[in-house]
Image: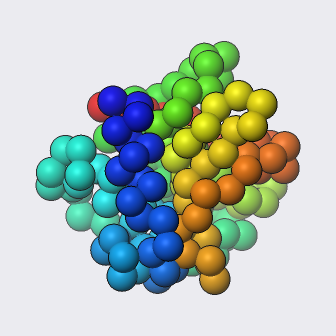
Amino acid sequence: MDEAIVAAAREWLGTPYVHQASVKGCGADCLGLIRGVWRQLHGTEPEATPAYTADWAECGQTEVLHDAAMRHLVPVAPRDDWRIGQVLLFRMRQGAIAKHLGILSVAGAEARFLHAYTYHGVIESPLTRPWQSRVAARFRFP
């Protein structure tokens, strides 16, 4: 299953970045990538996606992405191994809510992840220490 998740996500590589979109080859943001992989694995999305801002520095009290992930994905304990196919939830700035998502595509010393990134589209990036330090939570697809 883990390999299937990564393979499905890699099919989105090169998809342009479009805020709130989730159409392989046409446009996606980071949530759109996760939604697209979900649809490929499970069919219909589990709930309608509400409108949301693109601001990674958004402050607030409600962790909307974390709460949605807790409803539909399986939490991974912080002490558990990093495994390919895990969904990574990032907090991009201290004090901001967690607003970025990716899928771990390579685990270990040369870790990489797939994500949709503003101005770049869906790409595979090294999971460098700065990126790792921003991971707020990890999840598995059910």
At 61% across and 26% down in the image, what residue appears? 82
Image quadrant in which you'd find residue 72: top left
Location of the C terminus by quadrant is top left
Q: Residue furthest right?
A: 129
Residue 98: x %, y % from top left = 62, 55
Q: Depth check: 19 or 6 in front?
A: 6
Q: Depth check: 59 or 69 in front?
A: 69
Is 33 displayed left or right of 133 in the figure? left
At 55% across and 27% down in the image, what residue appears? 83
> Please, is residue 22 above or below residue 67 in the view?
below
Image quadrant in which you'd find residue 70: top left
Q: Depth check: 78 or 123 in front?
A: 123
Image quadrant in which you'd find residue 99: bottom right
> From where the camera sits, is residue 32 visible?
yes
> Please, is residue 89 above or below residue 57 in the view?
above
For the image shown, how many numbered marks are present on the structure?
0
Residue 41: x %, y % from top left = 24, 44
At 48% across and 65% down in the image, what residue appears? 13
